[in-house]
Image (tube, rainbow, N blue to C red):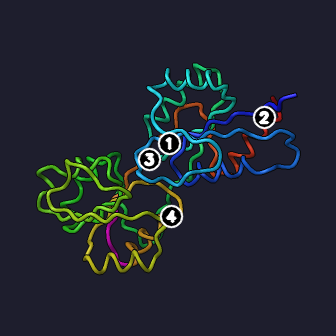
Amino acid sequence: MPVLLVHVLVLGGTTEARRLAENLAAPAPGVPLPFRVTTSLAGRVAAPRLPPGEVRVGGFGGPEGLAAWMREHAVDVLVDATHPFAATMSRNAAEAAALAHVPLLALRRPGWVAQDGDRWHSTGSLAEAAGLLPALGERVFLTTGRMGLAAFAGAGTDALWFLVRSVDAPKPPCPARMEVLLDRGPFDLDGERELLRRLRIDVLVTKDSGGDATAPKLTAAREAGIPVVVVRRPPVPQGVPVARTPDEAARRVRRLYASG
């Protein structure tokens, strides 16, 4: 008699998504049947770190396309473990889950919290962040990724110099005066200290991505007294339950399976 697998679709591209796939792929006490895990990647990173289980790359064609894919592949649970700033994909996931009548869980690492000595400036968008920069510094460490650089390519930032760190090379439009550093976290504190010192960085721009992999830059900026422009993350779609860690998400998925 064939073994029925509980099919979990993970919208991934993050460290948390990969760890969730690893967790669900491992045997668990009291769970008699294994999970079938499919991780979906957007395909924006040239050489992603692949999780265990099945992997698909590319978009779905909006919420209707995602709902159709879940019906076709008999998905039992959908987990949105995308980047905290992937707002469009999160909205699509919420709509698709409702269309396909599939339970949805969002996996979101907690955001960063300012500490004593931090000089944070909170903004709601990259464009707002760009508008603050001329009053804060001249040599900008831009760690918001390669997407959205057009916000920093306007006339108001022409006098600024940017160090842009990203996994893959950015495409135009880009800041007029820019150096690109291709690198992937995790980053260590000594390396971040040296980078700020060597390149005479006097302002840092980051999204509130949370997590430990890129947090040392915040400590280095605090130590150096450098202002940090922090772009606030968008909210999770209303009504979607949230897990803060891969282990918590795995427990919720297993409880959902056990109850169904």
Which of the two residues, 3 or 30, is positioned nearer the viewer here? 3
Pick the residue in front: 124 or 93.
93
Q: Residue at x 40, y 78 (%)?
A: 223
Q: Residue at x 42, y 68 (%)?
A: 218
The picture places residue 89, in percent across and down from the top left corner, at: 47, 35
Dot 4 falls on a residue whose secondary structure is: loop
Please report whichever mark, 2 or 4, sits nearer to the chain's N-terminal start: 4
How far apart marks 1 and 4 lie (CA) works out to 20 Å
- Of the two numbered discs 1 and 4 in the rendering, the one whose residue sits closer to the viewer: 1
Which element type, helix, strand or loop, lies under badge 1?
A: strand
Q: Which residue is mark 3?
A: 233
Q: What's the residue type where badge 1 is placed? A: Leu
Q: Which residue is mark 2?
A: 257
Q: CA distance from mark 1 to mark 3?
A: 20 Å
Query: Would residue 106 be visible to someone looking at this image?
Result: no
Q: Do the CB atoms of the residues marked 2 and 3 lie less than 8 Å apart?
A: no
Q: At 69% across and 29% down in the image, what residue appears? A: 76
Give the CA distance from mark 1 to mark 2. 24 Å
On whether residue 226 falls in the magenta region, the answer is yes
Q: Report if residue 16 is visible in the image.
A: yes
Density class for disc 2 (Cα within 10 Å; few <14, some 14-19, many ≥20) is some
Quadrant position of residue 6 = top right
Residue marked by disc 1: 41
Q: Position of residue 147 (x, y in %)?
A: 32, 48
Q: Position of residue 94 (x, y in %)?
A: 54, 29
Q: Which residue is mark 4?
A: 213
Q: Quadrant of the N terminus?
A: top right
